[in-house]
Image (cartoon, rainbow, N blue to C red):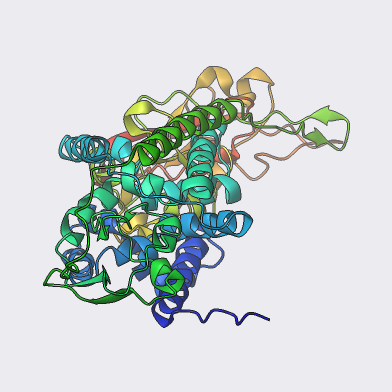
Amino acid sequence: MPKKKKSNPLKVTRVVLGTLFFLAITLLMLGVSDVLPHYLGWTARLQFMPAVLALNVGSFIVVLLLTILLGRVYCSVICPLGVLQDSISWLGRRQKKNRYSYSPAKNWLRYGVLLLFIVALVAGAAALAALIEPYSAYGRMVSSVSHPKSWIPAVVAAVTLAVIAVLAWRNGRTWCNTICPVGSLLGLLSRFSVFKPVIDTTKCNGCMKCSKNCKAACIDSKAHSIDYSRCVVCMDCLEQCNQHAISYKLALVKQPKPANEKPAAATSKSSSKAAKTDEGRRAFVVGAALAVGAGVLKAQETKMDGGLADIIDKEVPKRQTRITPPGSQSAQNMYQHCTACQLCVSNCPNNVLRPSTDLAHFMQPESSYEKGYCRPECTVCSDVCPVGAIKPISVEEKASTQVGHAVWIRENCVVLTDEVTCGNCGRHCPTGAIQMVRLDGSKPENRRSEGSRWGGNQSAPERLIPVIDEERCIGCGACENLCPARPFSAIYVEGHQVHKTV
């Protein structure tokens, strides 16, 4: 029996660390425990884009130093989308070995996308930039599976996942080295990294196994060269080389070439054909994935009340101003800093946060109260946000933060439309901002029987309507959520562009 090839210790270390980071980020995105943000939140804050947008200088410097010292280890260890692609490409290699080949860098595409990404950030359009940012893209994928809110974000996440998965299966790290702006930016630094994989031309026998197993397509084995701007330091080439001709070491001086080695030719006709074929396949795969993703629809079950009558779901009111979570300070702060990673959406215990479908704030979280309301004692979203779009806030600060104010819609109120008693909004307002009055505007003398039904000789309770004190209302949405009117609540919250303290 042939001996089993020993695993390279550097690759094993990379796989173990990458798996730990991947699991930590995924558990945070799933929102499986309230304890996790306190212990694993640093893994999200170490991500490149959150560190930049939150002005987290410490995390930013750590990522840059790692890149300058070791190369693009961020892409193979810390980035969850990178680890996901490695997992998919590993499955692809099990189906067909030696499936990759060297291809020249498409720098016009890489740096063109990077330029557009930087322009979007400088212009304050973080939501648009986040569509291709790896950490945020992965967060949307996990959130769309575990906490689906609406079909548009789900389709976007599904299409992104389909494209990345197919590219990773067939071609390894194509996404990272053609589209990903973080990969392109770190690639500029990794050219000058202190430690690199280096080819010893005196040991190389030209078997091309390194090139055929390089998922970054960056090893030109004929020219004995490596494109370090695309190398993600996965260590696969070290493990595959039977001659030990590739080693990861201090590489400040270029490796000398043997005297009998012929100068490298530009690119052979066969490799040109292979590269063109690969490009055609990639274009076809991307187009097919987009077509399939566009056909994804959200299935909704019809809910019944005791099997007799339909329960009509609440519909979203037409707000003039969207509601952003307490701690975001203003809609502008949220828009400029949020990467739409969906971490707050996944971890919201009250089902208040959902991704926006508005193009100006696409996939960024906004508050909506059809399925729950923002409880004054909850600060989870501010605890988990890694970018400073939702700044840390205490329970006391949240209870006095006004994100919006309640508005009563007279024609929707069941007290008037159905001639019944209610008072839900007044009973459940945590700040006492809603008072119930008679239809003529006067205060009731006795509210003991309010909201109850009567029978026998009991006198009918008074029908009361709400009056709102906007100065005391904090916009928590308890009134909107608990209002029995369907499909639109008779009372809803209008957001504030800038939050106030009451």
Residue 411 x, y percent position in the rendering: 55, 17
Q: Is residue 475 above or below residue 242?
A: above
Count the numbered circles shown. 0
Give the side of residue 8 with respect to residue 96, left or right.
Answer: left
Q: Is residue 369 above or below residue 250?
A: above
Choose between 249 and 121: the one closer to the eye. 249
Residue 35 x, y percent position in the rendering: 49, 72
Q: Which residue shows up at 54% across the image and 67% down it? A: 33
Q: Which residue shows up at 29% across the image and 39% down it? A: 129
Choose between 161 and 480: the one closer to the eye. 161
Give the side of residue 260 with respect to residue 462, left or right.
Answer: left
Residue 340 x, y percent position in the rendering: 38, 45
Q: Which residue shows up at 54% across the image and 79% down it? A: 5
Q: Is residue 2 above or below residue 272?
A: below
Choose between 238 and 462: the one closer to the eye. 238
Choose between 299 and 225: the one closer to the eye. 225
User: Can residue 41 be seen by looking at this rendering?
Assistant: no
User: Can residue 487 be seen by looking at this rendering?
Assistant: yes
Asked where in the image residue 311 lies, by quadrant, the reply is top right
